[in-house]
Amino acid sequence: MARKFLPQVATANDLFEGDVIYLTADNTWTREHAEAAVAETPEAAEALLKAAEAFPLQVVGPYLADAQIVDGRPAPVHFREDFRTRGPSNYFHGKQAEKTEA
């Protein structure tokens, strides 16, 4: 059985800073997931990914990620995408912040 289509956003990593970024409706990039353009159909998702791939000198690894709409704005569905919204893993948060040096 085919999987039900979920809304999607286009995400990538900034080529120069490495930060997670999201494509907006006006074809600019933002670091805020809630500002991302949302594709509501498979055809719109394909167009969104094609638009994201048009920035090879600015981003690396663009792909589509499932999203849910919360209070009218996109939010991550999968744990991996939720984790990516928190920034690079070299920042101390979660288990990293709980460790203390001996």
Image (spheres, grey):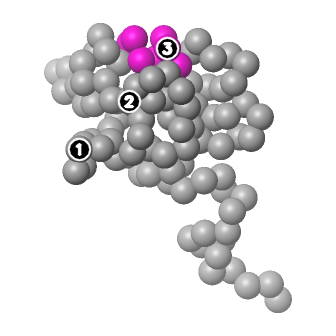
The disc, 3 or 1, on the residue closer to the chain's N-terminal end is: 3
Left or right: where does residue 88 sit relative to residue 32? right
For the residues labelled 2 and 3, say whether their Cβ atoms are less than 8 Å apart.
no
Q: Say which residue label 1 marks.
A: 72
Q: Say which residue label 3 marks.
A: 51
Task: Report helix, strand or loop for mark 2.
Answer: loop
Task: Report helix, strand or loop for mark 3.
Answer: helix
Q: Residue furthest front?
A: 26
User: Label for residue 90?
Assistant: none
Amino acid bearing label 2? Ala
Residue plotted at (38% across, 29% down): 37
Residue 102 can be seen in this image: yes
Left or right: where does residue 48 sit relative to residue 77? right
Corner quadrant of residue 61: top right
Residue 80: x and y in percent read 47, 47
The answer to whether residue 74 is above or below residue 88 is above
Look at the image and say whether residue 60 sits in the magenta stretch.
no
* Real-space Cα separation, disc 2 to disc 1, in angstroms: 12 Å
Corner quadrant of residue 67: top left
- In the image, the segment drawn in magenta is 46-52
For the residues labelled 2 and 1, say whether their Cβ atoms are less than 8 Å apart.
no
Q: Quadrant of the N terminus?
A: top left
Residue 85: x and y in percent read 51, 50
User: Label for residue 37?
Assistant: 2
Residue 80 can be seen in this image: no
The disc, 2 or 3, on the residue closer to the chain's N-terminal end is: 2
Residue plotted at (25% across, 31% down): 6
Amino acid bearing label 1? Gly
* Real-space Cα separation, disc 3 to disc 1, in angstroms: 23 Å
The answer to whether residue 84 is above or below residue 26 is below
Residue closer to the observer: 98 or 51: 51
